[in-house]
Amino acid sequence: MNSPDPLISVIVAAYNCRNTISKCLESLSSLDHPSYEVIVVDDGSTDGTSELCETFSGVEVIRLDRGGPSRARNTGVRKARGKFVAFTDSDCFVDSQWLKELEKGFIGPDVAGVGGDQVSPADESEMGKRIQEFLKISGFVTRYIQTEAAFGETTHNASCNSAYRKIIFEEIGGFDEEQFPGEDLELDLKISRKGYRLIYNPAALVGHYRPGTYREFCRMMRRYGAGEWHLVKKHGFFRLPDFGPVVVAAGLVALFALLVVYPLTWLLFLLPWPVLSLWFFLKTGSLGRTMQFILFFLIVLTNWNWGFFTGSWRPPVKRTTCGGHG
């Protein structure tokens, strides 16, 4: 950063999150940073979210009609006075050193954005903790959260834990207000294509609650698959997971075709699972968690791809749920 302690504007998009946003705002009020402001953009809540936020000293609350998380965040940026804009979600809470650690990532004028790590809160459900662990170790399955262990360049930082130079954010055009989910991924894609860099600092910590049931996890994966379809439609295949639906579809067609000629071809379907099981066991050291992670893998594989295919005839979601992730 070029000047000492420039103002950072922290923006939280919120919708019907009265039960979770207090913890978020309490953590933001305890930040160890000399110069920041907090802006909550309420995207049409009906549960008293705005009224609760207004009881927190120093928090600016902006009320909007329902328009989605991208519109809410963009509105917050337009109101922001800071040289940098930082984002977190209403179902997250931040470490006291969060902003200082994000600042450390701006190591040059070509660094447009910095993000950090997501961790399980102490009071997270057991299911949520297992999902967090699965997402953390399965970088070959999903880029939903970072798996890098070291400070350095990355291609994407999740919007629940990120900061950007405001001037570059506005130059890029901000979040696409028609895109959700995946709006943060698209923003980082546009930033990278403009020649700017993105940095990941694992010391910038945010606590983030995960789905508490298998049903919620399935729904989340379907939404992300559908969001990815709309990204591919606009930008083409730009990252490895995008080829997943094509590979899955081609593989199924080939498998069924071979079954007609060679009935024992179904055995090919079994080949990857011992390898995958060994991978998860080496990572977890637990047979029980290995079996659960195999189930998680199947949930991601089926629901993400189903969402991708069905996204072709469904419009992008335009809503903010608690946390901004759907």
Image: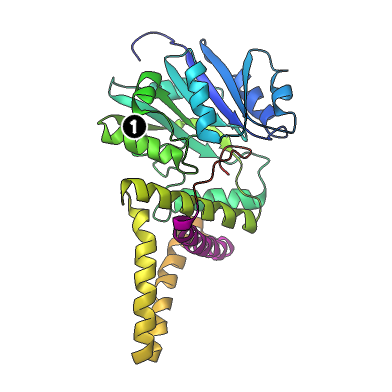
Q: Residue 290 in magenta?
A: yes
Left or right: where does residue 19 sit relative to residue 117? right
Q: Is residue 122 above or below residue 51?
A: below
- Residue in the foreground of this view, choosing between 210 and 191: 191
Mark 1 neighbour class, 10 Å CA radius: few under 14, some 14 to 19, many 20 or more? many
Per the rendered image, the range of residues in magenta is 286-314
Residue name at image x 50 percent, y 64 percent: 302
Percent x, y for residue 176? 43, 35
Residue name at image x 37 percent, y 76 percent: 253
Amino acid type at image mark 1? Leu
Left or right: where does residue 86 sit relative to residue 165? right
SS label for mark 1: strand
Where residue 41 sits, quadrant-wise, is top right
Characterize the magenta stretch by its predominant secondary structure: helix
Percent x, y for residue 99? 49, 21
Which residue corresponds to mark 1? 198
Residue name at image x 35 percent, y 15 percent: 1
- Residue in the foreground of this view, choosing between 162 and 138: 162
Left or right: where does residue 23 sit relative to residue 273? right
